[in-house]
Image (cartoon, rainbow, N blue to C red):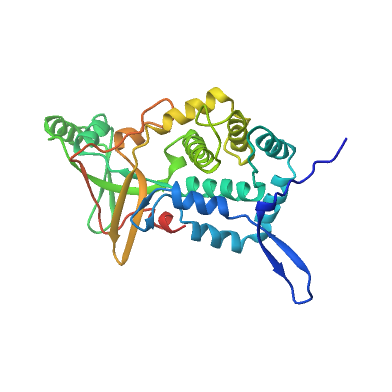
Amino acid sequence: MEENKLIVYPDDVDEVVTLTNGQVINKIDIWSYCIYFADNIQLMIGNNIYDGMPLGVFGNRIEKNQKEHLKTLYKFIKDKRVYEFQQDMNAKYGVNVNAFALCTLCEFINAIIHKKVVLLLKPTPSETIEQIKEFESVTFHKKNRRVFHCNNDEVLKVLKDSINKMECKPVTTYEAYKIVDRLEVFTKEILQIEFTYYLSSFFNQFFKINRKAKLTDVENRMIGYFLKWFGLSVAEVTDSRLRQLRMNYDKFDTTASIINLGDCTFTVQWHVIKYEDWSNGLINPIKRDIPTLKKGESIRFGEKLEGIELLTR
C-alpha cells in the first residue's frame, strides 16, 4: 500500500530563506488563513477584537507551545483524509488547499470558541421568592460573622406568611452574579455550531469557486471531519447535522459590552443569562433558544465580579 504523500503547493511557501552557509530553505506559510479570518470574518468593535481571542494572542500561544503545535501540524498533514480533501479540491475546483494554514486556522477557531464566557445574572426578587417559598429552615449570618440556624416552626410560619404577601414589581435592571465558562451553562453543541459557522464562512469567502451552493460537497465533508478531528464531536458529522448546526447559529444574540471594574477595562462578547434560564440545567442551543436581554433591560455591576479572571485567560 502506497504511503500517503504530503501535498505542498508553490503558494504554500511564505518566503525563501537563505542561511549564512548558502543553504536555501522554503518557509511554509501557516498564517495566511488565520490573517484572512481575523481581518474579514472575526467580529470586531472598532479596532478591538472582542470575539474570543485576538490573532496576536493566539500567535503568542503558538510561540510558547511550538512543540505541541508542530506535533498537531505533523499529525494533520499526514492524515489520509486531509490528503484526499486536498486532491479533491484541486481536481474538482482547481483550489490548492494549504494544509499547514488550514490546521492552524482550525486551531485558532477552536481557541476562540473555547475562550468565550457567559455572564450569569442574580435571581430577581420574584425569582428569589419562588425559590424559597417552601423552605424548611433558615440560616442567618450575623454582623459578628457568627451563623445562627433556625428551624422553629412559629418563626418559620411568620417568615413564610410575610414572603407570600410580598408583591414584586417587574424589573428591568438585573444584577451581575458571576462569569463562567460557557460549558458550565451550554451543552457542547454551542462549540459545534460556532466552529461550523466560522469555518463555513471562511471557505465560502476565501476559496474562489463558482458555487451553486454556499459550500461544495468537499468543503462540507472537511468540516464534518474536522469537528471530530479537533475534538468537538465523537464522530464525523453528517451533512444533515451540519445544516442543523448552521441554522442554529442565527439564534445567537451575544452582547458586546465594555465594562470597568476597578483599574481594569474589558471589551468582551458574552451571552448574558438570566437566573430562570441558567438555574434549570444545561442549555442545548439546538433544542432551546439562547436567552438574551430584552430591549430596555440593563445590568448593574458591583465592585467585585466573581470569575473576572476568565476574561484574561
Task: Count up the numbered dots.
Answer: 0
**Lateral position of residue 192 relative to residue 88, left or right:** left
Q: Nearer the viewer, residue 27 or 146?
A: 27
User: Which residue lies most toward the right here?
Assistant: 1
Which residue is at the front of the view, 173 or 224?
224
Q: Is residue 308 visible?
A: yes
Regarding residue 285, the answer to whether it shows in the image is no
Residue placed at 24% from the left, 59% from the top? Answer: 144
Q: Position of residue 36 (x, y in %)?
A: 50, 51
Residue at 30% from the left image edge and 33% from the top image edge = 276
The answer to whether 27 is drawn above or below residue 157 in the figure is below
> Which one is nearer the viewer's eye here, 264 or 165?
264
Taking the image as shown, residue 233 lies to the left or right of residue 168, namely: right
Determine the residue located farthest toward the top in the rendered image. 240
Residue 187 at what x, y percent from top left?
A: 47, 34
Which residue is drawn at the image coordinates 29% and 56% (left, top)?
Answer: 259
The N terminus is located in which quarter? top right
* Foreground of the two, 54 or 184: 54
Q: Is residue 305 left or right of residue 17?
A: left
Q: Residue furthest bottom?
A: 20
Name the image quarter holding residue 95. top right
| Residue 13: quarter of image | bottom right
Find residue 40 and report its horizontal and vertical position in percent.
44, 48
- Residue 237 at what x, y percent from top left? 59, 29
